[in-house]
Amino acid sequence: MSDGPLIVQSDKTILLEVEHAQATEARHAIAAFAELERAPEHVHTYRLTPLGLWNARAAGIDAETVLDTLLRYSRFPVPHSLLLDIEETMSRYGRLRLEKDPQHGLVMRTDDYPVLEEVMRAKKIAPLLGPRIDGETVVVHSSQRGQLKQSLLKIGWPADDRAGYVDGIPHPIALQEKGWSLRPYQRLAAENFWAGGSGVVVLPCGAGKTLVGAAAMAQSSSTTLILVTNTVSARQWKDELLKRTSLTEDEIGEYSGSVKEVRPVTIATYQVLTVKRGGLYPHLELVDKNDWGLIVYDEVHLLPAPIFRMTADLQARRRLGLTATLVREDGREGEVFSLIGPKRYDAPWKDIEAQGYIAPADCVEVRVDLPREERMAYAMAEDADKYRLCASSETKTEVVERIVARHAKDQLLVIGQYIDQLDEIGERIKAPVIKGSTSVKERQRLFDAFRAGELHRLVVSKVANFSIDLPEASVAIQVSGSFGSRQEEAQRLGRLLRPKANGKTARFYALVARDTLDQEFAAKRQRFLAEQGYAYRIVDAGDLAKD
Amino acid sequence: MSSIRALAEELAARGNDSLRRLFAVRPDLITPGVPDFAALAARACARVSLQRALETLSKPQLEVLEALVLTTDEDEGRSGSAVELRHAVGNATLGTLDSILAELSQLALIYRADPPDSIHSASGSRRRYYQPVARVREVLGSYPAGLGRCYTELASVSQFFAERAPDIVNAIPAAAQQQHVEHHIAAAYALERWASLPEALESAPAKAREVLAKFTNWPVGAVPHAEARVKPGRRTDNPVDWLLSHGLLVPLDDEHVELPRPVGLALRGGRIVPELSLDPPAPPVGSTSTALRRNAALGAISEVLRLVSALAVEAGERAVETLRAGGVGTRELRRLTAALRAESDQTVLALELAAAAGIITLDVDTSVWRATGADEWLSLSRPEQWLVLASAWLDSPRVPSLAMSPEGGAQLAPLSGEGQRPDAAAVRRRILEAAAELSSEAGSPDGRAVVITAADIRTRLEWAQPRLARRLRGLLDGVLAEATMMGFLGSGAVTRAGAAVLHGDFDELLAFLEEVLPRSVDKILLQADLTAVAPGYLEPGLARRLALLADPEGRGPATIYRFSAASLRRALDAGEDAASISAFLAEHAETTVPQPLAYLVEDTAARYGRIRVGRAGSFITSDDEASLAGLLHEGAAQQLGLTQIAPTVLVSNATPQEVALVLRELGLAPAVDSSLDPMVKLQRGRGPAASNGLLRPTPKLTVPSQDDVEAQLAVLRNQSAVTGNADEAAPMLGIETLQKAIRLKRAVRLNIVDALGNSTVEELRPVSISAGRVRVFDPERETERVLSVHRIIDVELA
């Protein structure tokens, strides 16, 4: 057996030994078909999933290449059943193709008669199909293109969509690379997307996903709809596009709760599109009534269900999904695959970090001992109150003060979940608090001040989790979080990962009350961060000074 | 002459080499040894021995034997040669038939006989003529070559047909030969000699011919209300009715019909075997890359070793429980599957292998399987471990796959009695040999490895050993699945390791496995996400200790151990402490111990035991700390085994009553609390790890050793050719004579011994013989009697 860097397990995971001489080579080879699941310091774990294998097929990689790669780099014999499984799974993609037929319009074709027969008999699929033309071809109602792809994926026969796209209304857009240029991986991501037609680009927070979007828009040069998570994020997109492209203020419209502008490039929030009145979505019209050439979905992993339904009807338009992670807390990865498209580009987080584009972060968990009376209160509290009690302990506020004192010169964020606690901390460290009740205008002003360096400290609640670019934050203190969600963690860390002007290491403190639920959730967080490859330390609050 | 005597003479006349070849193929002839050639011949004609011998025949050999059986008649002195057979067998030259007949003769299935009287003067006398040995007809069954019985025989079997036969014949003028037939025997003879049968078949309606085509390979078919359908002379459109009415099918009973032999022969163009299948079918084999093949084999070997090691350790810690009806129940199987981190089929195989290799044995007193041989097996090198398992599997009389997830039908419990199949070992070996033959024949096209499917093996076995193949069919898929999981087969062909075990090349196997099996590792990688990765097969001792400290997860060659506060507490319970754990981690970690892990170990150990639990016989408590301290320093303290666990509490191993007694002697006045008796702790330890002689396996002999054969030959050569009254041959000769008398309906003179030892000679007519009893008709008393064969001393045709 070769002495390769990979160990292929029968539970469909692949272990990669990072220190091995061939590790980089092997990593690039398997990244095409396996999802990186965990990346701690020595051994990274990749997982083989049907979606991952189909993504690879969509990128033109065949089963033989996958098997060869595994056998070549594997240290031990690869479980044979796994190899058979890979072959079987990969052979399923593309047996059914969606095509444009000059005579019949949208059709589904296959070279494998029994597959079509099986699919046509499936209860959920039969109503989506029109008359059968011959043994290998059946007409598809063009309105059902997305629904069909979704259903096909569910029964394990993902279709290869080659039916093409409408061009939309042309509108000239060009990148203006003045004093900056597209990074190589951004260029590659945009190119891969364009070649594939539709799909998702996976880049870590801070790696410049907006620019990938801009590059795709330039390539398409047509009217574009950009869907983002919230208004602040919409403003950031607008600023970025103004700065980086030939687009002017008049050409970019915002479609949100407060403003409803429809322009050649329109940025809309998920929230406004999913507003429901009398059982209807009044604003979905924006999507349907305009001839968009490109639709960009920011933060695909947060896409709400109504948007999925809407996307199912938009299969003739080019769709670009941008995200930091394909993992969805609701397990709807399959819908992203079938409705937005296969993964077109994915850069291992650590790779980009090593290239110096995002700042490495240093994570410190600070264990705080609860005072005796708080422990008693905690022990006797109802289950529902326990977390709030331990997470918003008095002692944490005092530790925050000590940390803030140590980082007097750094741009510092305090992140938390409980408003009372945040208000108190804000008062004690004399910093403004941004919470749900803060107006958009006020938020904008505070963020601007923070970015400009006029403001050193900022206390933010959950509202700041997503898509607010605070590149200068170099220290973050998390005092409480919402029950250890993986996604939230990635977002919070994302705040810190934006490139630092001075190349300094960002630091992330998490304050944890010992022997409580807080510690349990922290254990999950620790696992997640360590699995993401971050340096992680645990210190007692008392030892903080020595650290 | 009796066929046994004839065979005995022929065997005696053979050279030693010829006999050696015979013994190699039919080892049962000389196990145990025989005294003389007569006994040898008798044994060769015994039913069981013939059954075994017929199982070794290939399809062409069996076809020629069947043709010979159908064309010869011992009683009429009609023997057969290649010349006669050439008319009965298609696609065969005289040379081919001669050589096949010579092979059958070599196997002592047919013997040289005189040519039939009609041939005597002709030039054909130089040809060799043969007769099948006694009982070959019987063992071949009622339908040799898939042909039905003669009309005459059918008329004697089916009462209904006998009654209708004259009507049928009279309705067919060509068959009746213009004479009106009255009696059913005459009718049957007339049908037997039906000259224009081929024309009659030609003129049959097309649908009737379609029905007949279904009887090509087997003469019996199921037809509802068969008897009512016979309507001679009447018009009918139903093809089956038509055939029955025209005598081309014969009703056996109300449900079944049979195609008479003349009709069957006519359908085959007059030939018993339309086409002799001389060459083995060569299925088009698929191919795969050699890298895949090698990978599959080694992957399976590593996995099976991992599974059985894990089972050996698990069973050592907790014995495997059985159901009352025997076998391991679903719940226990699920528990083991979780512990082994495997699929349930893998657990089944691991259990069966461990039992077959003696790694776990059934404790008959408690009905649990204990890991009595585990330590011994685990101490072997990895190649040796596999060899032990592979040999045990190959020779096991059990079929593990019967307990694996079934496709329909109920699942057997692993290790239950139902998994037993006496011929499992032979079947397994034969299947693997067939796979090996196929892969060696196919070679390696374009440097790729061949892929043999179950269907290929089935086809090959049906040609190479058609009679055996019927028995193999049911087990084939299961055995192939087991072989694949064991690493005997890899991606559809016999692996190098598998072939070595099959051929008994154990040294070569060990050397090969030593070279290719991955080395065990003794270093682990510790990571900040609180995991330790063992990048490969971990030394068992190390693995056991690590499994105590952390929970193993993941399935495959590598294992990931996840540390948690709970897992560390488990280790602390087992007597570890922070220092020993840290030392262990530092010693075996390839890198430094990550800070979060070190913190976790320290933190957990420091907080371990905040609440302590212990065992004591009684406690002594007092508000007066000083008096307790004084007590501790009294001589009585040693006597009572006192320990201070808090300033105001002492504990003792003694019972409260004893303590009170001693304290009273010391002049104190203790008050005894009523307390519960200490619980008796259940010991759940391992049984005595006695060595049960788990030896390195030796190659299994499938043929008698050279020495045995030579010794046997020496014995045989010392005797005269046919001693005639040879003890062992006598009963066989007697039975042969009785059978002949039954066939010819002749009387025999029997010398019979009664219960008191008196012998009498009687002349009786035997009617039938079976299961060691002869039914005879006594013409003098006009009654039927049943005699035991062992009471008959001598038989002679009257």
Image (cartoon, rainbow, N blue to C red):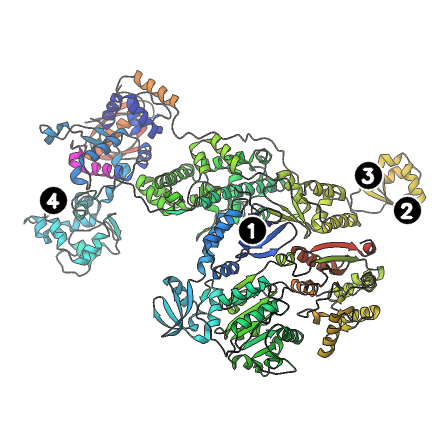
Along the line of sight, the residue nearer the viewer: A266 or B222: A266
Can marks 4 and 2 be said to lie on one chain?
Answer: yes
Q: Which chain is indicated by disc 2?
A: B
**Separation of disc 4 and disc 1 at Cα?**
84 Å
Residue identifier under label 2? B622
Q: Residue at x 89, y 34 (%)?
A: B635
**Separation of disc 4 and disc 2 at Cα?**
118 Å
- Left or right of A262 in this view: A542: right
Residue identifier under label 4? B193
**Separation of disc 2 and disc 1 at Cα?**
73 Å
Asked which secondary structure carries label 2, the reply is: loop
Residue identifier under label 1? A25
Along the line of sight, the residue nearer the viewer: B544 or B657: B544
Count of numbered circles in the view? 4
Can marks 3 and 2 be said to lie on one chain?
Answer: yes
Q: Which chain is indicated by disc 1?
A: A
**Separation of disc 3 and disc 2 at Cα?**
18 Å
